[in-house]
Amino acid sequence: MKKIISIIGARPQFIKHAPMQLQLQKHFKSLTVHTGQHYDQNMSDVFFNELNIPEPDYLFDIGGSKTQGEQTGMMLTMIEKTCMDEKPDAMLVYGDTNSTLAGTLVAAKMHIPLIHIEAGLRSFNRSMPEEINRIVADEFAQLLFCPTQQAINNLKKEGIEHAGIYLCGDVMCDMLELIKPRLQQLFNEPYYFVTIHRPYNTDDEKRLKRILTTLNSLDKRVVFPIHPRTAARMRQFDMSMQDFKNIYFIEPVGYLHSVSYQQFASAVITDSGGMQKEAYMLRKPCITLRSETEWTETLVNNWNVLVFEEIERIPEKMSRDLGKYVDGIYGNGLAAQEIVSHIKLHF
Ligand code: UD1
Ligand code: UDP
């Protein structure tokens, strides 16, 4: 049996890996490396438990706050050592985190065939670490699985046009379909569901204050599971959660609760890539606190709108008209199955 080693490390990657692992283990010896990029119980273990992902075969401890280089470098050393020991036939990486980059560089240097899930996404904003990470992964991958036609087009524009590129839908759609029957109402009044963790929204004190002040002034309560990066910045800037009475701050939640909160919210406000897609698939209006998005399909007919400079206009954007909903843009919930059948044929 061929051996595939999957590299995961951040919250969205555990969620993407859940449907993939179900399929991979049917046809391959499927090993998992958890880089330790995310390590809190509610940023990591909770997903393995609730999504029935087998314990990682390798779990690294890279410690907390690190610079981009230090974090990637530590992972690189440990992934390389693991690959020297395991000699995998292929490596699989997801999305665009520093764990993706570290895996990619090891695979490229060790001549291990690389599979990239969620290939071809571009924000065209090279100041984002994620944009650098995904460009490198797409450049070195032999098999690229694109969730959308736009992603295929982006690759083409960069001259990436080889035989290993496939349009397969989005594995996050698979996961959403799996969880849908279990969704539950968790908050008993009308509310908006909010997550914010991008450095450009959290690391500038004035901007973070403007965002929180605007959320605090909205006409409905705001449920906000706070990412550790955002919580750390609030502490650093001496901002008290008590000062934002309209915001119900909670610890990061598991996947079932995250999707449940979205399902029953009046709208979603976020800077998360995954949540823009989930909001769309759940037919929830979304406001994205970014100047651009990789998930351009969500912008169709105002279902998602970008707000960057004009944070104070969020209330006004809430009352926008929505046009026709376009169904099925992220696939039919069978992406993982299709991806694994391509991988099988390839090897
Ligand atoms: C990372 C990804 C981002 C993704 C996000 C998902 C990169 C460059 N960024 O950003 O693309 O959208 O994950 O959530 O890979 N921390 C904890 N506990 C944890 C995890 C993190 O305290 O369990 C702290 C870290 O110590 C660090 C900060 O949060 O100080 C940021 O973590 P990091 O993984 O570096 O970046 P994210 O902002 O989470
Ligand atoms: N999510 C979660 N708990 C939370 C917030 C988000 O399970 O408290 C889920 C969310 O439903 C989505 C994924 O995490 O499936 C998105 O990950 P994140 O926003 O951390 O990263 P991004 O997608 O921006 O890279």
Image: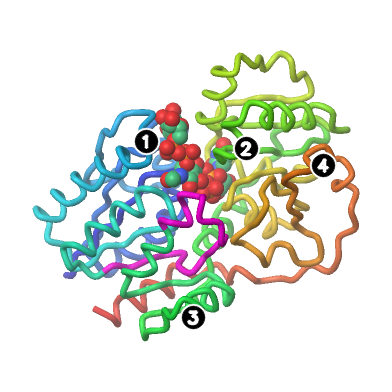
* Residues shaded magenta: 114-133
For the point 72% across and 46% down, the residue is: 308
Is residue 134 depicted above or below 237 in this figure?
A: below
**Which residue is the site of mark 3?**
156
Q: Is mark 2 on a helix, strand or loop?
A: helix
Disc 3 packing (10 Å; few <14; some 14–19; many ≥20): few
Q: Where is residue 23 in the image (x, y as percent from the top left)?
A: 36, 65
Mark 1 residue type = Thr
Tell me the quadrant of ligand 1: top left
Disc 4 packing (10 Å; few <14; some 14–19; many ≥20): many
**Which residue is the site of mark 2?**
201
Per the model, the C-alpha gap separating discs 4 and 2 is 15 Å
- Relative depth, front residue between 277 and 57: 277
**Sequence order check: which comes first, mark 4 or mark 2?**
2
Q: Where is residue 260 in the image (x, y as percent from the top left)?
A: 65, 43
**Sequence order check: which comes first, mark 3 or mark 1?**
1
**Which residue is the site of mark 1?**
67
**Which residue is the site of mark 4?**
314
Q: Is mark 4 on a helix, strand or loop?
A: helix
Q: Examine the rendering and report whether any part of residue 54 can be seen.
A: yes
Per the model, the C-alpha gap separating discs 3 and 2 is 31 Å
Q: Is mark 1 on a helix, strand or loop?
A: loop
Disc 1 packing (10 Å; few <14; some 14–19; many ≥20): few
- Mark 3 vs mark 4, foreground winner is 3
